[in-house]
Each structure stands twice: as structure tokens, then as C-alpha cells.
Image (cartoon, grey):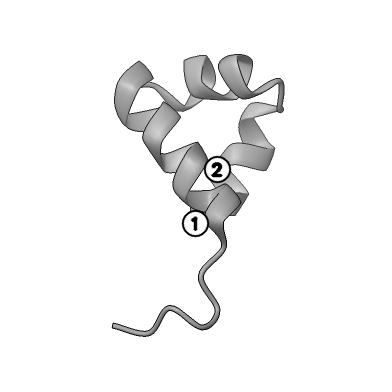
Amino acid sequence: MRFKGLDLNLLGALDVLLECRSVSRAAEALNLSQPAVSAALG
């Protein structure tokens, strides 16, 4: 696995998503829009 281009913010978003179990709730917890979180993960 390559870590050179790893975005640590994305790991934080993934952590919140796994905790919330919903993109919409994760977006709310991150103070972001749902489309922004989906695009970041996609």
C-alpha cells in the first residue's frame, strides 16, 4: 500500500462515517454537506 498520497482528512471522515453509519449523519457531524462527503469518499 502506498501512503505518499494519503489524505489524513479523508481518514478522519471515514472514521466519522463508520461511527455514524450514515453519510448524511457523518456530514452533519463534520459540518459538511452530504454531497461533499460522498465526493470525498468516492
Q: Nearer the viewer, residue 18 or 23?
A: 18
Question: Is 28 left or right of 2, judged from the image as shown?
Answer: right
Q: Which mark is residue 42?
A: 1
Residue 39 vs residue 15, the one in the foreground: 15
Residue in view at x 57 percent, y 62 percent: 7
Q: How many marks?
A: 2
- Please say if 3 is above or below 17: below
Q: Tell me where residue 34 sits by quadrant.
A: top right
Q: Position of residue 4 (x, y in %)?
A: 51, 83
Image location of residue 30, percent across then percent down: 62, 24
Proximity of marks 2 and 1: CB atoms separated by less than 8 Å: yes
Cα–Cα gap, marks 2 and 1: 6 Å
Judge the density around disc 1: few (<14), some (14-19), many (≥20) Cα neighbours within 10 Å.
few
The one nearer the camera, 7 or 26, is 7
Question: What's under tag 1, amino acid-wise?
Answer: Gly
Q: Is residue 31 above or below residue 10?
A: above
The residue lying at 43 percent from left, 78 percent from top is 3
Can you see residue 7? yes
Q: Hey, what amino acid is under mark 2?
A: Ser
Q: Is residue 17 above or below residue 1?
A: above
Res. 17 mark: none
Residue 38, labelled with which disc? Answer: 2
Secondary element at image label 1: loop
Task: Pinpoint residue 32: horizontal percent, then vertical percent.
Answer: 71, 27
Q: Residues within 10 Å of mark 2 (few under 14, many from 20)?
A: few
Q: Is residue 33 left or right of residue 40?
A: right
Q: Element type at marker 2?
A: helix
From the top left corner, tell me how far across and down residue 40 is, in percent.
59, 52
40 left or right of 6 in image: right
Residue at horizontal 40%, vertical 30%? 17
Q: Residue at x 32, y 22 (%)?
A: 19
On the question of residue 21 being in view, the answer is no
